[in-house]
Amino acid sequence: MSNFGERLKNIRTEKGLTQDQLAESCDTSAGLIRHIEKSRRRPSYDMLLTICNVLNTSPEYLMQDELTIKPSDDKDEVLRIVDHLTPGNLKLLKDMMKTWASHLTD
């Protein structure tokens, strides 16, 4: 089973980034990224959020083996679908969700 560091490395390589590129985008050192990927260090909360924003992923995904509550498969499936939408379709989906949410909370 993957741990945090392995999962970070996998998503970084899926995005086509080197450790140096990720480090630069996160305003940190490549050494820190290497240590995190080898599970020698844990990122700070702020660094975790920065990494997630740069890689367009969630903390839950990276930490799922360490959390007692596992993320929902439904959420992952929805996110995979959303990732493949065109910008126009993404806006349409957002507008539809806003409409649905307003009816659900009334």
Image (cartoon, rainbow, N blue to C red):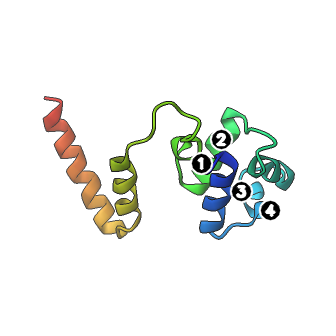
Q: Residue at x 63, y 61 (%)?
A: 10
* Mark closer to the observer (3, 2): 2
Q: Residues within 10 Å of mark 2 (few under 14, many from 20)?
A: some
Q: Position of residue 28 (x, y in %)?
A: 80, 49
Q: Determine contact: label 3, label 2, CB under 8 Å.
A: no
Q: Quadrant of residue 45?
A: top right
Q: Quadrant of residue 66?
A: top right
Mark 4 = which residue? 20
Distance Cα–Cα, label 3 vs label 1: 11 Å
Of the numbered discs in the image, which one, if any, rests on residue 16?
none
N-terminal of the two: label 3 or label 1?
Answer: 3
Q: Secondary structure at mark 1?
A: helix
* Mark closer to the observer (3, 1): 1
Of the numbered discs in the image, which one, if any, rests on residue 48?
2
- Is 18 situated left or right of 13 in this image? right
Inspect the image, locate mark 2, and give the three-letter code of the amino acid beneath it. Leu
Q: Residues within 10 Å of mark 4 (few under 14, many from 20)?
A: some
Q: Residue at x 78, y 50 (%)?
A: 38
Mark 1 = which residue? 52
Residue 43 drawn above or below residue 56: above
